[in-house]
Amino acid sequence: MTAPEQACPIAPVVDIVFSRWTTPILWTLNEYGTQRFVELERRIGTITAKVLTQRLRQLERDGLVVRTYHPEVPPRVEYEISELGRSLAPLFASLAEWSQHNLAKVEQARLRYDKKD
Amino acid sequence: MTAPEQACPIAPVVDIVFSRWTTPILWTLNEYGTQRFVELERRIGTITAKVLTQRLRQLERDGLVVRTYHPEVPPRVEYEISELGRSLAPLFASLAEWSQHNLAKVEQARLRYDKKD
DNA sequence: CGGTATCCCCAGCGATACTG
DNA sequence: CAGTATCGCTGGGGATACCG
């Protein structure tokens, strides 16, 4: 990372919360509750096991996700969103709302931009 | 892009608003108002001209930034945040607030995670 | 099941040089 | 000033195979 952290107070949090795949993971955990590895894998759909593992580890390290290992046979691992992770929910809701109101405008802007020139 | 758009309603907006360098650019334009290319370049600090151009074009296309070309000698180009771009301000403010309250917790979680094991 | 290990590939960025 | 053009590289992600 070459750090866009220069003139932007929210750069660190963007790195933590909005890096690749983290939003789908957090959203899914927040929406459907505690889930096993394969459930997450299936719900998110296009993610590979390797990358899902990497992102889950990162989220666990950052305290946004709690991983619980049950030493059974076969082994069972459960992931749930933490209190800290849940504190992002209103923010995600705001984003969803902005999306609902303004995504069409972005689409229109793109059409306008692509038409001319 | 392989699209994390599967199970996450906010994935599209994340792509538009939180892709690399877009937050520093939008933040700077929102904070310091209309600026020329070099001003942005200097304020953001570590970004290269090529990448700054790419991101500005993208933001212009998405309707978040307005580019005005003044055909003078030497040429003058001014960038300002659009109405649509400005509508993100409260969201950015919420992020800044979350940051202020919880970034330390993330840091602590990391220390805990790195200590054990 | 819930991963890790390995190889490979290419989009994206940096560096440099050039232009209207 | 405000870019574009070209080159070179690197690291993050995909595919595949394997393991406790």
Image: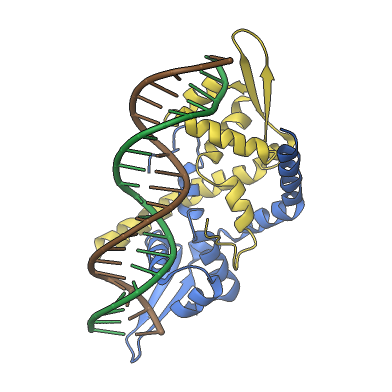
Chain colours: A yellow, B blue, C green, D brown
The answer to whether B43 is drawn above or below residue D14 in the figure is below
| Residue for point 55% across, 37% down | A55
Image quarter (top left, top right, bottom left or bottom right) of the C terminus of chain B: top right
Does residue A70 appear anywhere in the picture?
A: yes
Residue most extreme to the bottom: B73
| Residue for point 56% across, 70% down | B28
The answer to whether B106 is drawn above or below residue A105 in the figure is above
The answer to whether A14 is drawn above or below residue A87 in the figure is below
Q: Position of residue A14 (x, y in %)?
A: 59, 52
Does residue B34 appear anywhere in the picture?
A: no
As rendered, which of B47 and B99 lies closer to the eye?
A: B47
Based on the displayed image, in which of its 4 quarters is residue C2 positioned? top right
Q: Position of residue A53 (x, y in %)?
A: 54, 31
As rendered, which of A85 and B64 lies closer to the eye?
A: A85
Image quarter (top left, top right, bottom left or bottom right) of the N terminus of chain B: top left
The answer to whether B46 is drawn above or below residue D18 in the figure is below
Q: Position of residue B42 (x, y in %)?
A: 52, 77
Based on the displayed image, in which of its 4 quarters is residue B66 positioned? bottom left
Q: Position of residue A18 (x, y in %)?
A: 56, 47
As rendered, which of C7 and A110 lies closer to the eye?
A: C7
